[in-house]
Image (spheres, grey):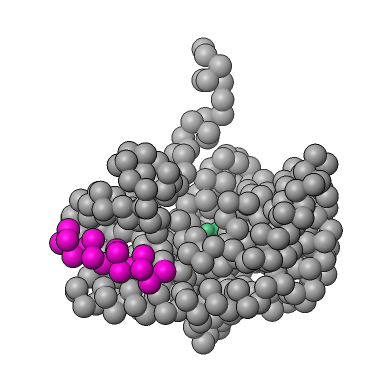
């Protein structure tokens, strides 16, 4: 038996996460220099100048270990969010936080519940712990929240082995979201021993009237954990900072399994500075809202079906020609994201770019179609 065979069976069964194609890779392959990446829901405005300045400032100290407790960042987050700093867990991206949570609750013979078409990391962290995934049926294609989370179906998957439920609000790659009243009834119905993660990676982008802020429920539901990130609207995806907000008791557990230096010093400094730049967040939000409107209009004008999205991306339907369209876009220097691994093989997920990027996208689409 080889050493590879001695690795855990659950690890052998994992499929590696497929990231968006990096710009440099496509440019290398095509010998071009100005590719546009609309494949990973990054902020096309970049990041706040305050974050850049904070990084420059922090450079002198990179020979020192970072603050393992991320005191300044937690302090700033606690103040901004109206929670206590001992309720905040910092992660190397919010994916790290999801992994910490899974490791606190899941092992063999336990289960996690999430929806079909939900963010793939839920499945990855669940299976890596040797636990089983209970995948709930999604809402039907003709529903206003097509392919979105069906909370009743998710509730029906909860049993005595369930330890954890993942809800993405809004979800990636569908962009669907769950309204306040429905989510509150769900929390009310879930047994208190089952932890519920509400992943709000796109929280700052959402404009919808009935979209809830899950932090409002923390005091009522001790089993609630809310995760957010600096990768999306804050434009710091490359630095890897995310966080969870929960009860202080759960936070204490997460910090026991957390790697002591999972937030590097440049990332901690940049994230703290980014929090102060309300103007950058507002501009990003407005640009996204305009971009979304532009995309909806242009897709509709071409009779291309799409899933209505509350995030900074839209999944559009190209049917049986999806991979040809993907390739055609690559050849024209535009990178989007196939989502067949989310069981949405007829769709491409397109991040909301700047206006010039979106014009290039639609010109390329016209050329292909
Ligand atoms: C992008 C994304 C995240 C954030 O990942 P990071 O590790 O913070 O970069 C989390 N959840 C969902 C649903 C996402 O789409």
356 within the magenta span: yes
Could you say which quadrant of the image residue 183 lies in?
bottom right
Give how far across and how far down residue 308 sits, in percent: 36, 75
Give how far across and how far down residue 162 sits, in percent: 59, 55
Residue 136 can be seen in this image: no
Give how far across and how far down residue 362 sits, in percent: 26, 67
At 37% from the left edge and 39% from the top edge, which residue is drawn?
Answer: 28
Give how far across and how far down residue 193 sits, in percent: 69, 61
At 22% from the left edge and 70% from the top edge, which residue is drawn?
Answer: 304
Main SS of the magenta part reads: helix
Left or right: residue 314 versus residue 213 is: left
Left or right: residue 164 versus residue 138 is: right
Q: Which is more toward the observer, 223 or 293? A: 293
Among all residues in the image, which is located at the extreme bottom? 209
Residue 358 can be seen in this image: yes
At 18% from the left edge and 65% from the top edge, which residue is drawn?
Answer: 366
Q: Which is more toward the observer, 155 or 119? A: 119
Left or right: residue 147 versus residue 211 is: left
Could you say which quadrant of the image residue 139 lies in?
bottom left
Which image quarter holds the C terminus? Answer: bottom left
232 within the magenta span: no
- Magenta residues, as a range? 354-369
At 60% from the left edge and 58% from the top edge, which residue is drawn?
Answer: 236
Could you say which quadrant of the image residue 223 lies in?
bottom right
Among all residues in the image, which is located at the extreme top? 1
In this rendering, the answer to whether 258 lies above or below 231 is above
Q: Within the displayed image, which quadrant is ligand 1 positioned in?
A: bottom right
Instruction: Count the marks.
Output: 0
In this rendering, the answer to whether 233 lies above or below 346 is below
């Amino acid at each position: 038996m080889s050493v590879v065979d001695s690795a855990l069976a659950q690890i052998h069964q994992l499929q590696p996460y497929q990231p968006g194609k990096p710009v440099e890779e496509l440019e290398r392959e095509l010998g071009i220099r100005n590719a546009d990446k609309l494949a990973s829901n990054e902020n096309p405005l970049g990041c706040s100048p305050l974050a850049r300045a904070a990084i420059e400032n922090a450079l002198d100290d990179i020979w020192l270990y970072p603050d393992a407790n991320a005191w300044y960042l937690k302090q700033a987050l606690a103040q901004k969010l109206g929670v206590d700093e001992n309720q905040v867990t910092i992660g190397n991206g919010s994916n790290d936080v999801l992994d910490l949570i899974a490791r606190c609750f899941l092992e063999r013979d336990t289960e996690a519940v999430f929806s079909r078409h939900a963010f793939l990391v839920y499945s990855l962290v669940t299976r890596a712990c040797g636990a089983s995934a209970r995948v709930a049926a999604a809402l039907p294609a003709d529903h206003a929240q097509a392919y979105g989370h069906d909370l009743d179906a998710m509730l029906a998957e909860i049993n005595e082995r369930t330890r954890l439920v993942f809800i993405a609000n809004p979800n990636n790659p569908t962009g669907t979201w769950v309204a306040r009243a429905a989510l509150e009834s769900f929390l009310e119905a879930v047994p208190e021993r089952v932890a519920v993660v509400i992943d709000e990676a796109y929280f700052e982008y959402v404009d919808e009237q009935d979209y809830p802020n899950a932090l409002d429920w923390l005091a009522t539901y001790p089993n609630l954990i809310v995760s957010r990130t600096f990768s999306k609207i804050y434009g710091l995806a490359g630095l890897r900072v995310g966080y969870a907000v929960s009860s202080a008791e759960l936070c204490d557990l997460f910090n026991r399994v957390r790697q002591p230096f999972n937030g590097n010093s440049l990332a901690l400094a940049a994230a703290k500075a980014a929090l102060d730049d309300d103007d950058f967040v507002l501009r990003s939000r407005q640009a996204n809202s305009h971009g979304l409107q532009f995309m909806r209009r242009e897709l509709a004008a071409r009779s291309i079906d799409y899933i209505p999205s509350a995030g900074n991306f839209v999944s559009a339907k190209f049917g049986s020609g999806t991979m040809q369209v993907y390739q055609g876009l690559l050849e024209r220097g535009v990178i989007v994201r196939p989502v067949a691994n989310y069981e949405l093989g007829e769709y491409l997920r397109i991040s909301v770019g700047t206006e010039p990027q979106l014009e290039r996208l639609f010109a390329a689409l016209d050329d292909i179609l």
